[in-house]
Image: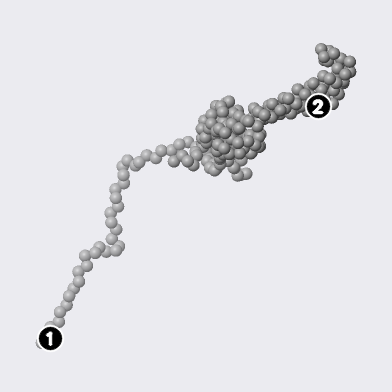
Amino acid sequence: FYLFGFCLACNSAEPKDQVRPSKPMVDNPEEVQVSKLVLSDFGQEIISNGKIKAKNIVALKFVNQEIITRIFVHNGMHVVKGQKIAELDTYTLEKNVEQSYNLLGQANLEYQNMLIGQGYKLNDINKAPEDLKKLARLKSGLNSAQIRYDMSKSELQHALLTSPIEGEVANLFLNVNSLSAPNETFCNIIDSKELEVLFPLLETELANVRVGDDFNVTPFSNS
């Protein structure tokens, strides 16, 4: 006898051509907000990296080469107009004033003697003609002596640096007992109350910028 077995597989999947029922339509659809299209300005943002700069920066300089004896300020210090900044050794400068004053007195005596020699009394020297007095001043060296005396007084006055404006001290690198360098900047005084922002723009951006436009400035140091 031979035994034959047969197995029938049952498939529970739905037929491919069977269509599922669709979801019912929503009775109350969501509202969509709209706005009327009108002609108006279009806001455009331009970003540019620049620098903040003080409009008023004063460079303080000594006119003489002398030893710096005192420095009254430091970098970052706020100063007011007329406040002392630094001072030089004034011994040599004071002696120059004394010497130039003595030379001025000698030249004045020579000037008076020349006019007296022309027949004028000491009390009547000012009555001499201007061309004669001018010639006497040149020959006596009175003009040159007066210039040297004025310069020596000015150099003594400039031995003390004072701030011409109110602001902050910057770029101060010398110390006491250092030798000042004539006409080189000793320090800067920066007026931080009046600042200006310098930043570049592309040529294509110029048409979108006008005088009076608002702008925001954010320093990189501001987190």
Spot occupied by residue 140 in the image (x, y as percentages of width and height)? 82, 25
Write down the residue under mark 2: 141
- Quarter of the picture holding the C terminus: top left
Residue at the left extreme? 1
Image point 78% across, 28% down: which residue?
144
> Label 1 to label 2, Cα distance in Å?
156 Å
**10 Å neighbourhood of mark 2: few (<14), some, or many (≥20)?**
some
Q: Is residue 60 above or below residue 220?
A: above
Residue at the top extreme? 123
Image point 56% across, 41% down: which residue?
50
Amino acid type of the residue that numbered disc 1 sits on in the rendered structure = Tyr
Spot occupied by residue 166 in the image (x, y as percentages of width and height)? 56, 28
Q: Is residue 125 above or below residue 178?
A: above
Viewer can see residue 50: yes
- Number of labelled discs? 2
Image point 12% across, 83% down: which residue?
3
Write down the residue under mark 1: 2
106 lies left or right of 132: left
73 lies left or right of 24: right
Spot occupied by residue 55 in the image (x, y as percentages of width and height)? 59, 33
Amino acid type of the residue that numbered disc 2 sits on in the rendered structure = Gly
SS type, badge 1: loop
Spot occupied by residue 8 in the image (x, y as percentages of width and height)? 18, 73
Q: Nearer the viewer, residue 218 or 79?
A: 79
Which sits earlier in the primary sequence, circle 1 or circle 2?
1
